[in-house]
Structures are given as structure tokens and as C-alpha cells.
Image (cartoon, rainbow, N blue to C red):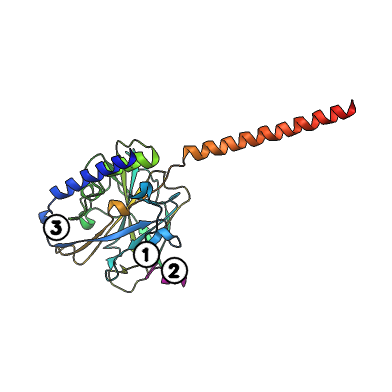
Amino acid sequence: MKSTRYRSAFAAALGGWLLLAGLPAYAAFSGSATLRVGSGAGTPCAIGSCFVYNGNEVNSLGDGDKLSIYENAANEVVSASANKPLLLILAIPNQTTNYFASNPISNVTFYDSYPTAFNSNSGTAGSSFIPTAGVYGLNGPGAENQSFFGSMTSSNIYTFLNLAEPTNNSNSFTNLKAAELAVNGIVATSFGIHVFAIKNDAAASADRILNGHGLANITFNSGALPAGTFAMAYGFKGNFAAGNGKVFSTPFTQAGLTRVPEPQVLSLFVLAFVSGSVLKWGRRGTAKTSRFCSAA
């Protein structure tokens, strides 16, 4: 049943992609490179060895307090500056208003390249902020200084945000909804879309960059991300204003998803606790009975 839902959702997204032949305003862009979302530096999932839900879909982000953006191509760099930031996009099921009262990101560290820089503890400091309207064509947020860019009920992430994305249409509402139901049991009628800009504070380049096979490690305040949150990334290199350069994005199969705790796990824990209590009570009862028998 789950596999069937995934295949149907993916087929629908693929059909949508075939219909989207490439928008005229984006015609000069050279295509899309992959930004892989993983569960953070120091985990196998950071570069692709993730636990994958249902065997063939989105990556597991665990509790979601830490995630990473990995630039998958060896010879490509993506901008990560104040004017050309790397974007982190979060999709929260059934969220129709601003979820975050303040920026939930507590730390950003860049590792170029990964894992060499991580193993040698030679990361560079980064930071995060809320992007302004117009960055890469980005629609403005609902209110000033809020990361909330609206509630998505159709289309796909990059089109919804008006980002220049000519080749990747797979993060569709259909796909996200199907995965949310199959993985977390959540029936999503909408997704609240939040966007954060990520920049490299220490890189020497004027644009600052995330190198090929580089990784941006992003830490959130504990418990900041609700269960069932999708995470995707977006970036660019070249001259966006002139309509040329290259888009970097996350396909659906490399997006991340935080997990709702399994009800079965909780049930087993409760059962084990109750069983242990009954056994302990039974032993006490047996001991008392033995003492009474001896007295007799």
C-alpha cells in the first residue's frame, strides 16, 4: 500500500515536470545540481548513507535538531553570501501561520571539503537570517522578519516560492503529502513554508561559497522543529540578475524528513513497564506468602 502510494505520487510529479518545459525567464540558466539534505556532520547520512523511508524515498532526519546540506558535485561551488545566500526551506504539515517566533537556528558551520575538514576540526563559521523578497525571485514573506512564506496546498516548493528552478519539480504537494502519510501517519491538507538564508562568514570569495563536496552543518534550538517537517535546500552560482548561472536544488529523493515517534514503540515501552510492575508485585506477594507459611 505504501509503495503504491509513493509510486503514484512520484508518477504524478514526473508528469508535472514533463509539462513544465522551462519558463522563459529562466531560459539562460544551465540546469540544476544536487544539494543533499542529511542528518548532520558526523553522521553517515551527511553524504548519503541515510536511513531511507520505505526503501526508496526521503532521508530520515531523526529528531531534527541538526541537519546538513551537502553539495554533491565534486567540481561545483554554490554561493553562500549575504547577497547570494544558500536557502534552507522547511515544509511543516498543516501549518498555516508563522510557526517560529524567532530564528530557531542556533549554529551554522561550513566544512570544505567534507569529511576532511570535519575530521580535522577545521570548519568555518556561518550564520543564518531571514531572506528578503526578490532573492532569486523569492516571493516575500507574510510579514517582516518572519520566515513564513505562505501555506502551500498545490504546486511544488520551488514554483510556490517563485524561485528560478527550471529542472526540478519533484518536491510537489502530492509527493510531500503522500510521504507524510506513509511515514508519519499525518494527513496533510497544506504545508507551511518557511525559508532561512545561510551564509559562510569566513570564506575568502566575494560571493563566499560552499565548495564542491562541501557541507553546511545547521543546528537548531532543541525541539525547535516539529515532527513531520520536510527540509530542502536551494542555491545559485553565476549572475542571477543577468539570467545566467546554475541552479542548485534538492530533489524529493534527497530531501529530509523528521519522524513522528512510532506508536508501536511507545506501546511496547508501556507494555514492558506494566509487565515489570506486575512481575515485581507478584514477587512481593510470593515473599509475603512464604513468610506466613513459615510462621504457621
In space, the residues marked 2 and 1 are separated at their CA atoms by 9 Å
Range covered by the magenta-colored residues: 110-122
Return the residue at label 1.
Answer: 215
Residue sticking out furthest to the bottom: 204
**Is residue 21 shown left or right of residue 99?**
left
Are the two marked residues, 2 and 1, in contact with CB atoms closer than 8 angstroms? yes
Mark 2 or mark 3, whichever is nearer to me: 2
Name the quarter where the N terminus is drawn: top left
Q: Secondary structure at mark 2?
A: helix
Query: Does 293 appear above or below 225?
Result: above
Identify the residue position indicated by label 3 in the image: 26
Is label 3 in a helix, a strand or a loop?
Answer: helix
Q: Residue at x 75, y 33 (%)?
A: 284
Q: Earlier in the sequence, mark 1 or mark 3?
A: 3
The amino acid sitting under disc 1 is Leu
Q: Quadrant of the C terminus?
A: top right
